[in-house]
Image: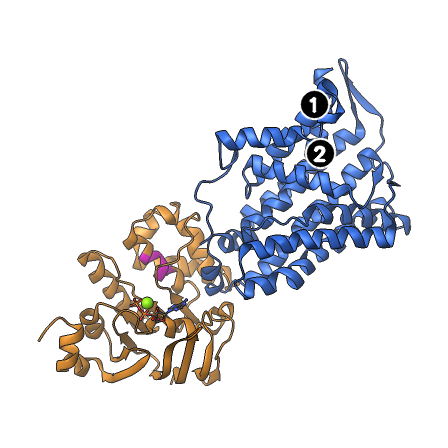
Amino acid sequence: MMLKINDLNTYYGAIHALKGIDMEVDEGEIVSLIGSNGAGKTTLLNTITGVARAAKGTVVFKGRDITNIPSYAMTKLKISISPEGREVFPELTVEENLRLGAYIVKDKGAISAGYDRVYDLFPRLKERYKQQAGTLSGGEQQMLAVGRALMSSPELLLLDEPSLGLAPNFVLMIFDMIKEINKQGVTILLIEQNANMALSASDRAYVLENGKVTMSGEAKKIASDPKIKKAYLGLG
Amino acid sequence: MLAQQIFNGLALGMGYALIAVGYSLVFGILRLVNFSHGAIYAFGAEMAMVFIGLNFGIVPGIIASMILTGILGIAIDKIALEPLRKKHSMPIASLITTIGVSNIITNLLIVFLGSEKRNFPQLFNFGSVKIGSVVISSTQIMMCVVSLILMGVLVFIVYKTKIGLAMRASEQNAKAANLMGINVNFVISFTFFLAGMSATIAGALVGGYYQIVYPNMGFMAGLKAFAAAVLGGIGSLPGALLGGLIVGVSESMAASFMGSTYRDSIAFVILIIVLIVRPHGLFGRKGITKV
Ligand SMILES: Nc1ncnc2c1ncn2[C@@H]1O[C@H](COP(=O)(O)OP(=O)(O)OP(=O)(O)O)[C@@H](O)[C@H]1O
Ligand SMILES: [Mg+2]
């Protein structure tokens, strides 16, 4: 078990955003987390990464309790995130953004291997390596956010709505990249509004409603569930 | 006469510029005007004086004070400002805190050292250079040289080193910087340290120039340097340099052509005019909002 979440509870003031989440992610899997707006998906990632505080429950990564560790310690543990809203550094260049992704990496060779890997996955970023990140298109910024997260060679990659606001061809390409990254040996926890794409790309899935997991299991099974079809897949 | 005043003003302006960078560095990363910076500058000058008095020698004394003042900067942030950030308090709370800290530092200096003016040793004395009718003293030359070197070092740190990249990243998006593995609170401490060190160098240079230091020396100098930082575009290092020079030269001109009663207000008159024409200052960036 790579990531194990037990009874996780998070509050924003009086708002009880996560109400006892249990979840597991195995090494090598793509696990997706779907749910409507405000369900608590981002809050879950924020709690894992120390941006929000867990009031109760634990987050265990590779056997180690990492509940409420500071955010800046995540990349050292080989967990990295492409956060909601991309959060690139707008006035820094593409290259500088990627360099920051490898901030904790000391080995020069590993850093240049990181650039190669990212430019290989996203040739568009290579063409624009001197461009300020704030002037990239939304899709390019998304590639940058994912690429930046890869620079620390994570074992677990957290992706918060990587396809949000992208044109259909970009969505396809981002999902192809996610599968490709997974093939390279990176375990992925994927949050998506685009449940269709997410379920077809993942091994397993969790459905989050109102701060609670309401369904979990094999992605295929979830995709064929009548309730899910109706609520999230626009079918039925 | 005019050329002479310009040279006097440039030397003085370098001193303002070195104080102004401290405002700019801290503002860049916290979007906070650190009103205790003038007192930090006075502390740096006074401590240099104290260390020199303890027979450290002039340069080691100044270096010891740079380190101590840098640590003071870190302590101010850790004790008074970081707790406010953790609680997500209003920006105005931090601002008023820095004003309070400023008074505390100044008063402690008065309690322990006395409020009177003390002689500061002349730092450089290898005669003066004469170009036409303009006489430039060795102190003035060295003020310019040392300040420019320090500016160069700061620009190098911010734009060419890894910690500098972390400073710029934290400035643009602290949350994302944390997620990259940057300990943003450490970066902030480092920034306060740099600001304190620069202020000490400014304090020693200006102290050596007038050969005088006193606990309240940071009040006016701090306000004028703040005006210089805003004038140049707060957050910008070249802006702090240019702003400092403009303030220094205009002050020197005002003092000799309009009478010394005007010397302390001219910086603010210029500041107001520049801000009306260019609200973000001379080198200021438009999109300077906290993300
Ligand atoms: N910083 C905050 N302060 C107060 N409430 C918050 C904060 N962030 C999130 N919430 C609340 O917590 C709940 C969960 O929000 P969260 O962002 O986790 O949802 P989400 O599932 O990611 O939604 P979306 O798909 O829209 O991104 C929402 O009701 C939201 O209003
Ligand atoms: Mg979200």
Location of residue A180 with respect to A131 vertically, above or below:
below
Left or right: A236 as drawn, with respect to A114: left
Q: Quadrant of residue A180?
A: bottom left
Disc number lying in front (1 or 2): 1
Question: Callout 1, which amino acid?
Answer: Ala
Q: Nearer the viewer, residue A142 or B98?
A: B98
At 19% from the left and 69% from the top, the residue drawn is A197
The answer to whether tags 1 and 2 share a subunit is yes
Give the labeled residue for mark 2: B145
Give the chain coloured blue.
Answer: B
Residue that extends furthest to the left in the rendered view of this protein: A236
Segment tinted magenta in the rendering: A142-147
What is the count of numbered marks?
2
Q: Which chain does the residue under circle 2 lie in?
A: B
At 71% from the left and 26% from the top, the residue drawn is B262
Q: Report x, y in % for residue B124.
A: 83, 34
Can you tell which mark lies on residue B254?
1
At 67% from the left and 63% from the top, the residue drawn is B79
